[in-house]
Image (cartoon, coloured by chain):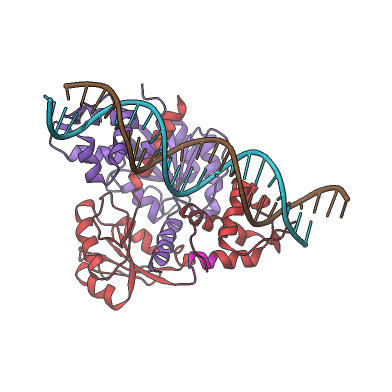
Chain colours: A purple, B red, C brown, D cyan
Amino acid sequence: MSYKISKATLGRLPMYLEFLKRQKVENISSTQIAKQLELGEVLVRKDLNAVCDQGKPKIGYNRERLIDSILDCLGVERKVSAIIAGAGKLGTALLDYKGFTEFGVDIKAAFDIDPKKCSEHLSNGKCIYSMDTIEEYCRSNDIKIGIIAVPQSEAQDVCSKMIQCNIKAIWNLSPASLDVPEGTLVKNENLALSLSFLKTCMIRNEE
Amino acid sequence: MSYKISKATLGRLPMYLEFLKRQKVENISSTQIAKQLELGEVLVRKDLNAVCDQGKPKIGYNRERLIDSILDCLGVERKVSAIIAGAGKLGTALLDYKGFTEFGVDIKAAFDIDPKKCSEHLSNGKCIYSMDTIEEYCRSNDIKIGIIAVPQSEAQDVCSKMIQCNIKAIWNLSPASLDVPEGTLVKNENLALSLSFLKTCMIRNEE
DNA sequence: TAGATTGTTAATCGATTAACAATC
DNA sequence: TAGATTGTTAATCGATTAACAATC
């Protein structure tokens, strides 16, 4: 079914999803979606086309079927477990955040070297464990995604550990750039760079 | 001086900067930079070319001058003040993080509607104030960047307030999509989407 | 001179947009 | 039939890569 979908399209699917969920109508046209989301209407049509079966001229796309197709493409129904390395403020904030389950990612626990932080139970019942136990935990709980929220100096070490216990995708929130073997996915989320980029654009915008 | 630099190039400059800072040599070639950062060497050359004066055949680029040029392009020496709306876990984590100053962004304070959170002093001396005072604070402290870390339902309200008090760039960490007037910059940093995207790529990678 | 490295011009690639034919 | 909307083919655009000439 859902063969090659471009990364650009894949990146927009959640936008469509969120928008479609908020609508009440039975059918919706690409024109309306495009206007609301401030995208080109042909672009929307191409995206939807890559994802689902045909829409109907004059009517548009069936909203519910569209939602199902997108969920299917994103693999939302497929639940994946994740853990966080580093229970500092950022790590704990992520552990506590509820918005990930909606996309089928379940953050199970966090790990930290500081014994004072360990065994803490958060409001949602999740737990912080000792970093020593991370490998065993990952292996026995089928963890597929590792989230790195440790300081830069420890990031590569933690990353290597994660790879050893079969983690296939890494979300790197540290400023370190990571060495990984082929086949492992890394997504860098460098917040300082991101804010810095905004600032640079702002400054250059003024001139 | 630094006229039109493409967004793609601008986005890579911090990578170069960080790498160059770690080196010890006087001169460095685009070939070496490319190899280390896993970029095409022509790409590196084009980027550097857009940013600084010419390198020298057989020698490469003077490291220090290169660093200065990049800092200049990024506008790092120009300090800009920011505030955070929302002092939940994420907002507090950002307020507490030290990595932003390196790029010339100074997060001054956070604001929250919950009186219990207000007047808290963090380790670094920064403070959380009542949301009621946000407008006055922004006006009297020349705040240029607003960071939105409130729940989705409040994001648009806070955003409008920010625009009223002359904030020109918004870093939106909420999942809301914001309506802003022309001329205001918005950068959406939707962490749930980002992790979801990684998961989707991972699933599609397996097949 | 030979070799390493630079900068430039043309080709390629992926994504978006424009133009238009097809269909309910 | 007319009109709204779809899907497709070609054109454009921006970014990257390839090929190559220039230079210390």
A57 or A201: nearer the eye? A57
Residue A4 is left or right of residue C18, and the answer is right
x, y percent for residue D6: 25, 29
Quadrant of the image for the C terminus of chain B? top left
Percent x, y for residue B48?
Answer: 59, 58
Whether residue B128 is visible here, answered yes or no, is yes
The verdict on residue A90 being magenta is no
Q: Please name the residue shown 25% across and 54% down the image.
A: B178
Is residue A141 shown to the viewer in this render?
A: no
Magenta span includes B74 = yes
Q: Is residue A199 left or right of residue A99?
A: right
Residue B167 vertical position relative to residue B11 in the rendered view, above or below: below
Q: Nearer the viewer, residue A195 or A149?
A: A195
What is the residue that sits farthest to the bottom in this orientation?
B140
**Left or right for A163, reference B129:** right
How far across and down, in percent of the image, does residue B169 sit?
Answer: 33, 63
In which quadrant of the rendered view does residue A54 lie? top left
Q: Determine the image quadrant of residue A207.
A: bottom left
- Count of labels shown? 0
Residue that appears at 50% across and 32% down: A166
Q: Specify the segment rendered in magenta.
A: B71-78
Depicted B135 relative to depicted A35: above or below: below
- The residue drawn where x is 30% and y is 47% is A97
- Left or right, B60 with respect to B130, comes to right
Q: Nearer the viewer, residue B40 or A104?
A: B40
Query: What percent of the width, then of the height, locates residue A110?
Result: 40, 45
